[in-house]
Amino acid sequence: MNPIRLALFLTFSLLGARNGWSQVAAPKLLPFQGRLTDPNGAAVPDGVRLIQFKIYEEPSGGSPRWSGELHRTTVNGGLVNVILGTKSPFPPEVDFDRQLYLEITVDVSGPEGRPDNAITPADPPMLPRQAILPVVFAKEAADSRLLDGHDWSSLFVEGVTNPATARIDGGRLGPGSVTAAQIKPFSLTGSLIASNTITSAHMAGAVIGTDQISTNSINLSHLTLELIQDLMNPPGTIIAWMGTNSVPPAGWEFCWGQVLDGDQPKYVRLFSVIGFSSGKGDGGKQFRVPDLRGMFLRGVTGNRDDGYQDFDANSRVPARGTGNGQNRVGSVQANAFKAHFHGTANNTPNNNGGSAYNTGNNRPPNPTHVMWGAAAGGNVDAQNSESVGGSETRPNNVYVHYLIKL
């Protein structure tokens, strides 16, 4: 017994050109809908299945009149919905005015009945073949007064036959003429929709929410690079970049203090965020990005007052003379060394034989010098302490480029 069987519940119908149907040639298409179940009658799990279809004139044996086609279709609640003839046209010898038989083979040859994405001899055709009965009523309808000699497109373009559901806009069927209420659940699948035919312009606002999107059906591969970058780094974000070339990555600019034009679409979002905080250009919306070459970043003090704030925040100056100053984003500050003094811890006689000025545990009169004096009221000699250190105060560091998100 096959691990999967097909339970049919829908009559086949043929769409396309038949004798007497229409004067306009059209391809023959055969809509097919069925339900895949396990031997116990339960629907197979949702997912993608590979199914092969062939048409014979005999209920068993014989050679196919239509060599068939493969459909990789989505199964929802066990339902399978495809249109045959879309990949391999039906040849003239396939006569739908006589009884035919559809042979169906489902990919089930993987481990434990799971598909392996191929139709092989290990995938036996389902038995018996499904009968395709002649569609007598359709041929009779083709000869009727309403349809004989008419282009069926008028039913959908002008809405003449069903005005209750049509919305005429400039002589054509307007948006919303076919609503969700007229569409059977799960009857429109991905295999029926051509790629890139449905865009945001075809969708009403707020009609698609998280409830309409299957879990894990959208990942980073479906998003544009710009959207991914915006989700991770909003405009104005500063990052350290180890790139060695002189061209920043797409969507970023170097923080070199250069002037950008806030009227250009490329820079509109960044200007709306940072404005003139790091300086202005020659006029209009020309603005500067921060110049972070050789700079350390420091958080704005704001209203912090617990002893860790920048006590000199109000003495900060504008970048390039036109940016923000004082306790605001974009202000700059020169280097500094916190005021302090050094004492001496020993007693040393002066050169004139007098007693030394003892500064062991006491702050000397002038904290910037070591003071030496004469024993009997002689002249005081001020001596500088020994010079140590380099040209600036700094921690261990490594060079990087700072980038700002556009």
Image: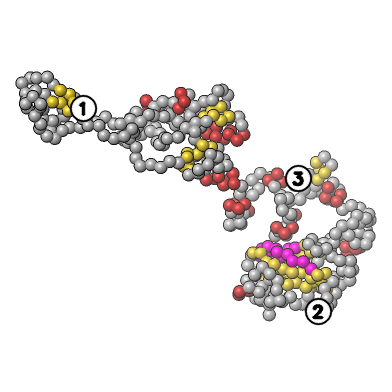
Q: Which residues are magenta?
A: 68-82
State left or right for residue 258 relative to residue 201.
left
Give the residue displayed 82% in from the left and 50% down from the top: 156
Image depth: mark 3 or mark 1 in front? 1
**Circle 1 — which element?**
strand
Which amino acid, by three-letter code, is at mark 2? Ser
Q: Residue at x 80, y 64 (%)?
A: 88
Q: Is residue 269 visible?
A: yes
Q: Nearer the N terminus, badge 3 or badge 1?
A: 3
Query: Can you identify the residue that label 3 sits on?
Result: 175
Identify the secondary structure beneath mark 3: loop
Q: CA distance from mark 3 to mark 2?
A: 48 Å
Pick whichever of labels 1 and 2 is earlier in the sequence.
Answer: 2
The residue singled out by tag 1 in the image is 384
Q: Is residue 132 visible?
A: no
Q: Is residue 77 magenta?
A: yes
Image: 269 above or below 75: above
Q: Nearer the viewer, mark 3 or mark 2?
A: 2
